[in-house]
């Protein structure tokens, strides 16, 4: 089994175009620091002026989420989002 981490958060629609290059740099920073490249996605719809974005990381080691949290605290990117970043870990299911 391998672990996957999904991190989602809200970005104000009127700041999304400015935030996107910041997130490209963020994803590069994470890859350089951890050796794990992620994927950045968003929901196609906007709700109440907010877009939902999600970072997805596959095949992560046990300490990855703690490392990611430390990098996030140093990133200075919190002002680009509305509310908190939420992280959820999933594992692959074996097919029976």
Image: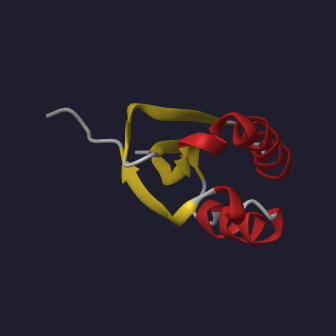
38 with respect to 59 (left or right)? right
Above-or-below relation of 88 to 46: below
69 with respect to 46 (left or right)? right
What coloring was used for the rendering? secondary structure
Residue 90 x/y as whole percent: 37, 51
Residue 37 found in image quarter: top right
Above-or-below relation of 85 to 96: below
Looking at the rendered image, the quarter that the C terminus falls into is top left
Looking at the rendered image, the quarter that the N terminus falls into is top left
Query: Which residue of the protein is positioned furthest toward the top in this rendering?
Result: 44
Residue 14 x/y as whole percent: 60, 42
Q: Residue at x 50, y 53 (%)?
A: 10
Residue 77 x/y as whole percent: 74, 59
Above-or-below relation of 22 to 8: above
2 with respect to 29 (left or right)? left
Q: Residue at x 50, y 54 (%)?
A: 9
Q: Residue at x 82, y 41 (%)?
A: 25
Residue 38 found in image quarter: top right
Q: Residue at x 60, y 58 (%)?
A: 81
Residue 21 visible to the viewer: yes
Residue 60 x/y as whole percent: 58, 50
Residue 56 visible to the viewer: no
């Amino acid at each position: 089994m391998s672990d996957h981490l999904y991190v989602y958060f809200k970005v104000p629609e009127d700041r999304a175009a400015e935030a996107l290059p910041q997130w490209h740099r963020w994803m590069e920073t994470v890859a350089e620091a951890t050796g794990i490249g992620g994927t950045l996605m968003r929901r196609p719809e906007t709700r109440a002026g907010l877009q939902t974005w999600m970072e997805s990381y596959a095949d992560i080691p046990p300490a990855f989420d703690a490392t990611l949290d430390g990098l996030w605290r140093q990133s200075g990117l919190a002002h680009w989002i509305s509310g908190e970043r939420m992280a959820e870990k999933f594992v692959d299911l074996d097919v029976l």
